[in-house]
Structures are given as structure tokens and as C-alpha cells.
Amino acid sequence: MAANKPFKVLVNPNSTDAEKAAKEAVSKHKTLLIAGNCWVHYSGRAKSKLEPGERILIIKKDGSLLVHRSTGYEPVNWQPSGCIFHTKLKENVLEIHAVRQKQQESVRVFFDNIQLEAVLDLVDEGEFSLYVTEEDMQKAVLSKPALIEDGFRPISYEKKTEPGFVDVYGVDKAGKLVVVELKRKTASKDAAFQLSRYIDAVKARADREVRGILAAPSIGKDVQRVLATLGLEFKRLDPKRCGEALRKADTKRLSEFFNET
Amino acid sequence: MAANKPFKVLVNPNSTDAEKAAKEAVSKHKTLLIAGNCWVHYSGRAKSKLEPGERILIIKKDGSLLVHRSTGYEPVNWQPSGCIFHTKLKENVLEIHAVRQKQQESVRVFFDNIQLEAVLDLVDEGEFSLYVTEEDMQKAVLSKPALIEDGFRPISYEKKTEPGFVDVYGVDKAGKLVVVELKRKTASKDAAFQLSRYIDAVKARADREVRGILAAPSIGKDVQRVLATLGLEFKRLDPKRCGEALRKADTKRLSEFFNET
DNA sequence: AATTAAATTTCGCCT
DNA sequence: AGGCGAAGTTTAATT
């Protein structure tokens, strides 16, 4: 556990201390967190008014603002990053005014009672990755081969050690052999060449025509040209739809498929 | 100022106390707020992994969950209302597990260091009102044409892609054709010219006199002169009164109007 | 730079 | 209950 980090917490602060902390947070680009009784005025593309009630206000170092009520996943009022903030104190009411030049918008939050206020210095270098695993994509194709094309029937599959590449072998509607290479992200030139090598290897053994399909969420124009030159095909395969297909798939049957191979 | 409300604030709590407070918040349907070092796993429609870093976690009484990083207006991980929560303690790591049956989703948040934890009881009955979008103004005029002028009868309406402009066509007391252009904010010169172009187009088709009314909350002196030059009229239209008119309008009748056109 | 498409979109209204 | 459309949508990608 790391040593305790420097941050400020005020419980039931008076308005003067509250404003001081808010000013500090904003000027030093820290995270400001306030829980208390407030009302909010928004004006910009539309207008809104929020009558008094207890909410949570968050202001981040990039100049984004959030006001959260006691329920609901969405903020009741907000402002994307890039705001400039002003604070004002008037008759023990703390006003925090967020102005966004870009969209000509402004949000004013007025606190007349603060339960909790914190000025945090959040250090966050952690990477965020949203993914569909190669295995997920493979499972999706196996459970719903039409994702590749109508009439496609998988015969076997092979998991490769290289991350991001998984092949599925099968036959198409006409009975022609098909090699499918899956890629989690945008198809690269490498992927095209790799698929080409597989195709060549399979052709040499099978001694008959083999189709090669590179299935990925997207492909660049240049890679598309490479594919065409190599006589290969591209099939757009949306990771999201793979996920959907997976969920809708008959899990039992799918697991059986995996077990029996 | 109201008396201080009961709530709990923990600064640098140990994991045992942290879990205890989290359990209390969830079971008693309070708002849970944690700032600390965490990592997050999400699995559902997609999958995601968030490497360790310092963030803010909010769990609301309706079972919604938010994980906010130090920047960005949007949460990095979230879950809409309706989650069921489980907490677990393992080697001083607090795990909060949110499960949503409806979508078959789950979010796991792991804290190994907590700077601040609060259990709040937010009381919020304040009304939120969003008012006067262009469409609102249009609906208001359609439901209460007298907002434009006495005896005005709308015939049809048209929604434009340009933001802020909505037209209503109708006839006045004398049976003369009227084109109304609505603007959410102060009428601009552009609006005047735009209306003028409409009028010209309508005149060309209808081959008879057409009145043009620019309806907006306010108008500048210069724009007023432009209007006069173009032979057009200005009608002050208070957004607030539009909102009121809308609320008071017979919703059924309004929807019928929209259907029959 | 502008336009289009996607989002773990969510949410509300209508059929 | 399912489907469609809007959102103060925002944000990323593509032309």
C-alpha cells in the first residue's frame, strides 16, 4: 500500500472554507467533489432549471463538470471538458459557474449547504481496454457462421499463439474450401500476408481451390488493395455483433461443439 | 441552514471498515462514494478491463454504478439502475461486484487503497425542468396559436435541419397566408434573411400575398430594421410562456394534431 | 473542416 | 412488451 496521498476533506464546511477549497481545486487542476444541497441553472443549446435538493458535484481537472442526483445513471446537469470556472460567495451561498466558450454554454451550481467537500489529486495512468477476445469472435462465428457469409459451414478451428489471429476452416455454400482469419481490430497488411501464407499452405496440401476471408471490424484502403492483389476477400465483422451473437447462441450446444472437437 | 444530516465519512479507512461502510450503503439504499486506487472488470454486451489507477466510484440507491476517471465527462465504466451488489474482502482488497440481471452484465471494482469513502443519504425532491427546445416552441405554437397572434390558425409545420429554426405555416384572422419562423434565442439577421427566402419561395408558388413573422424571445434594433426593410414582422415569444403553454396544453388534442397532418 | 456513424448508448413514448 | 426516435446526446472515424 502506498503512503497516504495529499488530499483535502471538509465535512460540513462553512461557505468561506468551501469556496476556498473549490478555488484551490479549480486553480490547481485537481478533482473537486461536493455533496450538498444545491440548485442548478443551465443555459446553452437548451435551458434547464433544477430546484434545490441534495446532489453530488464533480469537477475534473480537464474542466468537465457533473451534477448527479440520488438516482439515475446519467447526470442531471453536466458540461464536457474545457470549461472555465468561477466561484462566488453571496450570503453564504457558494456559486460555481462553469462556462464553455466552444458551445456558448454555462452551468451555475448554487450550494447553500455542504455535507462533504473533497479536493483530490487523482493519479490515473491505468490503461482502459474494451475488447472482444479473439476467442469470443471465434465462438461467435462457430455458433453463427452466417456472420461470415450465408451458407458458410465451419469444419474445424485452430487457435494460434499470436494474439489476435484465429482461423476457422469451413466450406461455403458451393462446397468450396474456406479459410477465415479473424482479427480483433482493423485488418493490417500483416494479417493479409499471413492469411495468404495459410492459403498457400492449404492449397499445396489439398490441391484444390481455396477461398481466403479476412474478417475484422474494419480495413484500410491500402490493405484492401493488398487483399485484392492476393486474391483474398474481406468481410466486415463487427465485434459488437459477435458479442450479441454469442449471447443469443445456445450456450449448451456451443459448449458441446467445443468439447467434441 | 438545516441541521447537519447524518452521513458517514471515512478518510483512509482500512479495508475492513471500508467494506462495512459499503455494505451498509448498499443494504440501506444510500449513496456510496469512494475515491481510491482501483481496477475494474466489465463483462456483458462487451468486455473491458481498466488497469489500476485512482478513480471515483459512485453507487446510488437505485442500483446504478459509475466509475469516473480523473478526466472526461463520461464514466469509464458504469451500470444503469437495477444492479444488485456484492462485496468481498480478500487480502485487503475490497471488491464491489455489480450484477444486472436484465442485461446479463457485471462490473467488478477492486480497491486496494481508499482515500475517501462516504455513505450519504441524499434527499432530493427538487423538480428538474428542461425548457424551450425548438420543437417545444413549435408544439407550443401549434397547441396555442394565439401565442403568435389572435385568430392565427396553423395549417402545417416543418422541421428544419438547421438547429434553432422551425417553421409553422397557417392563416391569420383575415385568411391571409402566414409563415412563422421560430427562434429559441434572440432573432439574428440570418433568421430574418432566411425567413425572407421562405416567403419569396411561398409567394412564387402561391402567387398571393404572404405574411412573414419572426417569432423569438427578443430581437436587436438592427435586425428589426432589416425585418422592416424586408416587409416582415416580429413577434416576441417568451420561451417560458411556451413551456407553460405546453404543460397546460391538452396533450391528447396535440398528439391528434400531429397525427392528422 | 465537415459529415457520418457508433455508443456497453439510455430513455421515453407509442403501438 | 417490443419498436422507434430523440438526446443539451458525445466522440471517434472518415471524406
Image: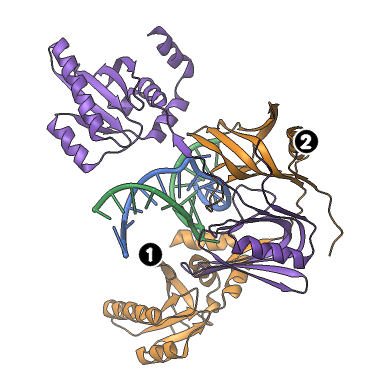
Chain colours: A purple, B orange, C blue, D green
Which secondary structure lies at badge 1?
Answer: loop
Q: Which of marks 1 and 2 is in front?
A: 2
Does B82 sit left or right of B230 as displayed? Answer: right
Residue A5 versus residue B148 in the image, above or below: above
Res B161 label:
1
Secondary element under disc 2, as helix, strand or loop, is helix
Q: Dot 1: few (<14), some (14–19), or many (≥20) neighbours within 10 Å?
A: few
Residue that extends furthest to the front in the rendered view of this protein: A3
Q: How many marks?
A: 2
Identify the residue shown where x is 27% and y is 76%. Answer: B205
Subunit bearing disc 2: B
Q: On the picture, is B110 further left or further right than A255?
A: right
Which residue occupies 47% across, 87% down?
B220
Q: Nearer the viewer, residue B215 or B125?
A: B125
Q: Mark 1 lies on which chain?
A: B
Where does the image place residue B134, in percent across and percent down from the top left?
49, 68
Quadrant in which the N terminus of chain A appears: top right
Whole-percent x and y of residue B12? 73, 42
x and y percent of residue A36 in the render? Answer: 74, 58
Q: Earlier in the sequence, mark 1 or mark 2?
A: 2
Residue B230 position, x and y percent, is 35, 88
Q: Mark 2 points at which residue?
A: B17
